[in-house]
Amino acid sequence: MKDTDEIIIKGLRLTCHVGVPDEERAQPQELLLHVRLHPFSDPQPLQDDITRTIDYHAVALHIEQLASERPRKLIETLAEDIAASVVENFSVSRVTIEIEKFILPNTRSVGVRITRLA
């Protein structure tokens, strides 16, 4: 894959404990996650071999596990934790994490988007 290519996980639903007030963190809530993974550039063709690319199923499972490990006050912290772990555990040159939270009345969602480099 080329360094301009992206693998996208769009709309991953996470259930986790997040929120500044203790009352909000007490109950799990659903978040929506969008992930853009940029593989390291490789001039060789993939040859239909999953070991030569990023296994997005493995990434999704990894993110779900990480999100459920502990409560967090901020979705920003969750985004940072996810980005750092994806960079550390998968062969990516860059990752963008976007998290949507459904908490404010009269809004579709609030969110955060971060990009981190390997």
Image (spheres, helix red, strand yellow):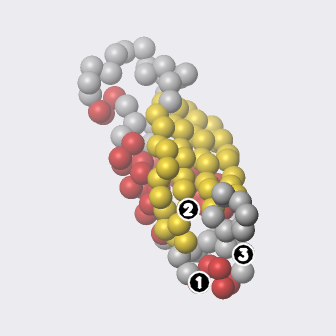
Between discs 1 and 3, the one toward the N terminus: 3
Residue that badge 1 annotates: 26
* Label 1, label 3: how far apart the Cα atoms are: 10 Å
**Circle 3 SS class:** loop
* Label 3, label 2: how far apart the Cα atoms are: 15 Å
* Amino acid type shown at disc 2: Leu
* Label 1, label 2: how far apart the Cα atoms are: 15 Å
- 30 over 24 or under it: above or below: above
- Kindly identify the residue that appears in the image at 66 percent across and 58 percent down: 109
- 47 over 84 or under it: above or below: above
The count of marks equals 3
Residue that badge 2 annotates: 31
Question: Residue 36 location in percent, x, y?
Answer: 54, 38
Quadrant of the image containing the C terminus: top right
Q: Is residue 17 left or right of residue 103?
A: left
Question: Residue 76 location in percent, x, y?
Answer: 69, 58
Q: Is residue 100 left or right of residue 57?
A: right
